[in-house]
Amino acid sequence: MVPSYAQVFTALCGLATTAVAVQPVIVDGKDFVNSVTKDRFQIIGVDYQPGGSSGFTGKSDPLSDATTCMRDAALMQRLGVNTIRIYNMSPDLNHDECASIFNAAGIYLILDVNSPLENGSLDRTAPWTSYNPIYMKQVFGMIEAFKNYPNTLALFSGNEVINQDSVEQVPAYVRAVQRDMHDYIAKHVNRSIPVGYSAADVRNILVDTSNYMSCNIKNSTSSRSDFFGLNSYSWCGKSSIKTAGYDVLADDFKNASLPVFFSEYGCNKVTPRVFTEVQAIYSEEMTQAISGGLVYEWTQEANNYGLVQINDNNTVTLRVDYDNLQKQFSQLDLKKVQSANSSQTSVDPVECSADLISTNGFPNTFDIPTRLDSIQKMIDNGVGSTNVGKLVPVKNTKITETVYDSNGKEITGIELNVLSNDQSNLPGSNTSGSSSGSSSSGSPTSSASGSAKTNAAGKPSASGMFSLAGTLSAMLLALVA
């Protein structure tokens, strides 16, 4: 049957939507906001680093293999995730297919610009030695690689670099990196990309760290964080807001001048994890101060934080933790989660001053290191990256791997649902797959390669366009034949 012009136009629109599922997110006061719909955006996400940092060599990364990305994006979409955080990436690899898959699924990316490789991050013991053009080329390369993906939500300048073992100068160097990132983005990106910091939940310096990163320095406003992430594991098992200290966190950040969210959560001292903290994180009491969170972590590694298990035979088993988290996500009142809180008022950033800091040994002066001339040249001229990412059509939506539920039964029919414009994924809205009646004959075995949870340097944790053109050419030829 010869297609009509209307059918061709419809097909064109359908193919086009595979590249524009989400709209960029911006910072508005203390909220993340959809830049088009203006809806408040709450992070409902997971941390994603299959193989852990010990498995990262720079030759591949979590967003360099399209088959793996399709599998994980479909399973995350089914779970209810709208955001993932990736710790270790190579700016020299092609991420177009994976970024496009997650974009089509309505899932945003928060990226750490650092890596565990040499010259890949700030040295907390001597940051002045690691703040150099080699390191900053890696950072700017990450911006180039991901700047054109609309689902690039934000960039982390550092992860737990500031802690009990760091020297006093570290916070100033983190702000220097953020200054350079902001200035590079302003010069070479056609939209704003939020830049912020992910902190360890070290009680005696947490508020000081937040105050230091969020205040305004008159001669260095671009060094200020756009958001503040918190890695917290204080809620274990069936806890409560008070027992877990969430009430203290809510009080600490109720007057924050920027979005604050859990960049890691999910204590595993009680297993399987029941994730009762989900209801607290997205409750009215907490959303006064907190913009959601990311569960640590997607794949099962030696540290036992996984939601899914990648087996030796390349099959996947959804762990009980996955089921429990999905159940908690499905109970959220999404209208309340997304709506602006009328009692939540925006707070203007305060000017940096010594009285913001209360801990001895934490810097209470705000002298940001001078930018090196070699780094200034990269900001002025760009890093000359040939690997500037772009969205490509998502050609297939079915996963090829066999997936088992937590009882060992095969789940069939799992498929990625390509969302239309302006949409992000929401719990319960894009589910697929059903379990078979019997368990698998062979018991899958785990492939938990990776190392235990470590520190800030990294947790262990255009062919498509030709295909699109060929498809459309064939349809148009059919019309005139």
Image (cartoon, helix red, strand yellow):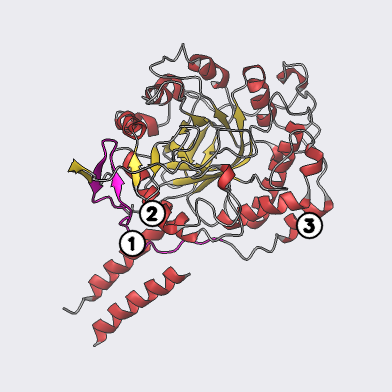
* Label 1: few (<14), some (14–19) or many (≥20) C-alpha neighbours in 10 Å: few
Residue 396 marker: 1
Q: Earlier in the sequence, mark 3 or mark 1?
A: 3
Residue 377 marker: 3
96, 68: nearer the viewer: 68
Q: Nearer the viewer, mark 2 or mark 3?
A: 2
Q: Is residue 28 above or below residue 278?
A: below
Type of amino acid under label 1: Asn
The residue under the point 39% across, 24% down is: 271
Residues at badges 2 and 1 in contact (C-beta under 8 Å)?
Answer: yes
Q: Is residue 291 above or below residue 69?
A: above
Q: Is residue 59 visible?
A: yes
Residue 201 marker: none
Type of amino acid under label 3: Lys
Segment colored magenta: 389-417
Image location of residue 435, percent across then percent down: 21, 43
Q: Is residue 352 above or below residue 387?
A: above
- What type of secondary structure mainly makes up the magenta span? loop
Label 3 – label 1 distance at C-alpha: 42 Å
Residue at label 2?
70
Image location of residue 40, percent across then percent down: 43, 36
